[in-house]
Image (spheres, rainbow, N blue to C red):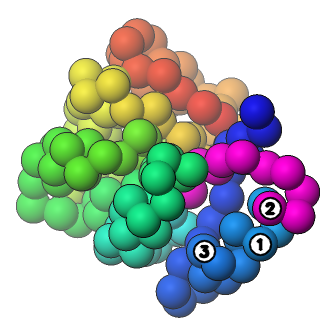
Amino acid sequence: MIIDTHCHAGRNWFEPIETLEAVMNKNGVDGAVLIQHGGTYDNDYLFQVAAARGGRFKVVVLVDPDDEDPLGALTRLSEQGAAGVRLYPRETFAKVDKLDVWRHAGELGMVVSAMGSCSEFASDDFARIVDGCPDTQIVIE
């Protein structure tokens, strides 16, 4: 089985899911992880296309850092079927400490897809995140 672990599809930036599926079919790719693209906090399109395709796709969402209740939003997205959440190590949240978001993802069984630079991943701040979230699976993009 071949799985593409980082794909994008969308209505406003990346190609629609049909284009991605055509490329996957041509190349013998069985499934993919749909990663929400930066700045898009409406994850409905990814959920809709994943649900319509019988388990071929898993969804990694974004949570708006200005959300009044980002932990609640993350819980709701998990309940909708999100397999993971995309976070920046340097990202800050208006209402909670970022460590709480990373930790909550792990508590929900969600993988964190961490986007950033080499210097961010080598920073003391990222070490604090990793040390503070021992139950959170982190994939470095």
Instruction: Give the residue pinned by disc 1.
Output: 22
Q: Residues within 10 Å of mark 2 (few under 14, many from 20)?
A: few
Picture coordinates of residue 22, whole percent (x, y):
77, 72
Is the residue under label 3 in contact with that under label 1 (CB below 8 Å)? no
Q: In terms of image quadrants, where is residue 43? A: bottom left
Q: CA distance from mark 2 to mark 3?
A: 12 Å
Q: CA distance from mark 1 to mark 3?
A: 9 Å
Closer to the eye: label 1 or 3: 1
Is the residue under label 2 in contact with that under label 1 (CB below 8 Å)? yes
**Disc 2 residue type (three-letter):** Asn
User: What secondary structure is found at the residue carrying circle 1?
Assistant: helix
User: What secondary structure is found at the residue carrying circle 2?
Assistant: helix
**Residue range of the region highlighted in magenta in the rendering:** 25-34
Using the image, tell me which numbered label, if any, was put on residue 25: 2
Decide whether residue 78 is among the magenta residues: no
Picture coordinates of residue 9, whole percent (x, y):
60, 72
- Count of labels shown? 3
Picture coordinates of residue 136, whole percent (x, y):
41, 21
Left or right: residue 114 versus residue 86 is right
Instruction: Give the residue pinned by disc 3.
Output: 17
State which tag comes first along the sequence, 1 or 3: 3
State which quarter of the image contains the C terminus: top right
